[in-house]
Image: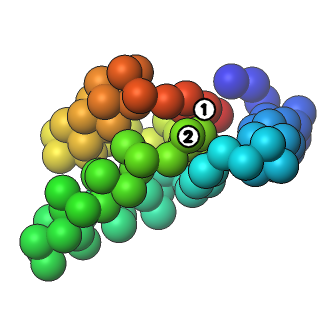
Amino acid sequence: MGPVGVGKTFLAHALGHIACRRGLAVMCESADKLFKRLKAARLDQSHVAELRRLFAVDLLIIDDFGLRALDSMETSDFYDIIDERHRKGSLSAN
């Protein structure tokens, strides 16, 4: 966390790049796009598959998290992601 322009995204992407170079699976996405994708996945019945993709990577980087309040469905999705990833892999939210 920190003010705009201090390099949070740059640092997260650098760590993701290092992880990729070491052969790890990395996914980086903005929080807004991630939650919009999960909402759309609920509509076309692919929500479980989308969550599995998020659980499967070694490092999940969620950028621009906390810029706006989450609704109840987004909060539930975020909890599921954190709970599952706590057991299986790394997460960076900045």
Structural crowding at the residue carrying mark 1, measured as other residues with C-alpha within 10 Å and reported as few (<14), some (14–19) or many (≥20): some
- Seen at 14% across and 78% down, the residue is 44
Q: Residue 18: x, y in percent?
A: 84, 41
Q: Is residue 12 above or below residue 30?
A: above
Badge number at residue 40: none
- In percent of width and height, residue 12 lies at 75, 39
- Callout 1 secondary element: strand
Q: Residue at x 33, y 36 (%)?
A: 81
**Residue 84 falls left or right of residue 29:** left
The part of the image, by quadrant, that contains residue 39 is bottom left
State if disc 1 and disc 2 touch (CB < 8 Å): no
In the picture, measured across the screen, residue 32 lies left or right of residue 17, that is left
Nearer to us in this view, 92 or 23: 23
Secondary structure, mark 2, is loop
Q: Is residue 16 above or below residue 47?
A: above
Farthest front residue in view: 23
Give the alpha-carbon distance from disc 2 to disc 1, as whole Å.
11 Å
Q: Which residue is mark 1?
A: 92
Q: Position of residue 66 (x, y in %)?
A: 50, 35
Residue 63 in sight in this render = no
Q: In the image, is residue 49 above or below residue 44?
A: above
Going from N to C along the chain, the mark reached first, 2 or 1, is 2
Q: Quadrant of residue 64?
A: top right
Residue positioned 42% across, 47% down in the render: 56
Q: Which residue is mark 2?
A: 58
Q: Quadrant of the C terminus?
A: top right
Residue occupying the point 30% across, 61% down: 50
* Tag 1: amino acid: Ser
Residue 45 visible, this orientation: yes
Q: Amino acid at mark 2?
A: Asp
